[in-house]
Image (cartoon, grey):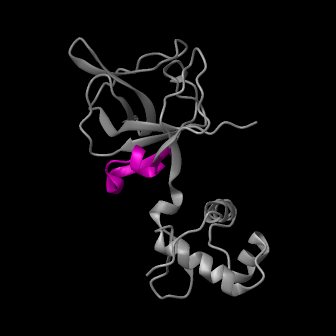
Amino acid sequence: MPPAMNERDNDYLGSLRDYYAEARRIPSYQRICELMGFASKTAAKKLLDRLESAGFVERTPDDDAWMPTMRFFERPLADIAVRAGAPDMIEGTQGELLLIDQYLVRQPSRTVMVPVKGDSMIDAGIHDGDIVVVERAKAAQSGDFVVAIVDDEFTLKELALEKGKFVLKPHNPAYPVIRPQGQLEIYGVVTGLVRRYRG
């Protein structure tokens, strides 16, 4: 019978996730002992065995180290939406678990993460420094935000129709609508956005 996780293992898992976020690897048994306050490497191995049984870690293909599984990267998803107006209680309302990649990416082989530079889409809530999730080979329609190629340069704009022709519409009045003279090439359609706040 596989070992079951105990009540402290969620705390240990949190520490391993923090370590992985910085080091990009699962620590050695010795390092786990130092992080968790274990007295022996046997305790560290037993912890990883329990986490393996729960689906959070697994052995590498050549069986020489531990590595995270997809479940290792799950994050708690609150079972209520937060209001932008009157406050609601969120603490203690964890619902299902969320894997960011599964939420944002539908076609991994055709998806590219593209950094945003500039402020031409700021009124649409897309800021300089954001990262847009772009699905290539997705059919673009009027109203979609797209990454297009114009005069051999990439630009992020809203695809719009004007007098029966496609144009690229900025969301900042300081920028003009782009009206391609030749064929408009769509690199991909924006399907999501990632922003990290600092401070």
Q: Please check the rendered image and state whether residue 98 is part of the magenta-colored stretch, yes or no.
A: yes
Q: Residue at x 74, y 70 (%)?
A: 36
Looking at the image, residue 165 sits to the left or right of residue 58; the answer is left
Q: Nearer the viewer, residue 3 or 60?
A: 3
Measured as percent of width and height from the top left, residue 42 is found at 67, 87
Q: Quadrant of the N terminus?
A: bottom left
Looking at the image, residue 92 sits to the left or right of residue 19; the answer is left
Looking at the image, residue 63 sits to the left or right of residue 104; the answer is right
Q: Residue at x 59, y 39 (%)?
A: 92
Q: Nearer the viewer, residue 15 or 1?
A: 1
| Magenta span | 97-114
Residue 83 in which image quadrant: top right
Q: Residue at x 32, y 46 (%)?
A: 136
Q: Please check the rendered image and state whether residue 49 is part of the magenta-colored stretch, yes or no.
A: no
Q: Quadrant of the C terminus?
A: top right
Q: Nearer the viewer, residue 169 or 48?
A: 48
Q: Is residue 75 above or below residue 47?
A: above
Q: Is residue 161 above or below residue 152?
A: above
Evaluate whether residue 67 shows in this view: no
Evaluate whether residue 98 shows in this view: yes
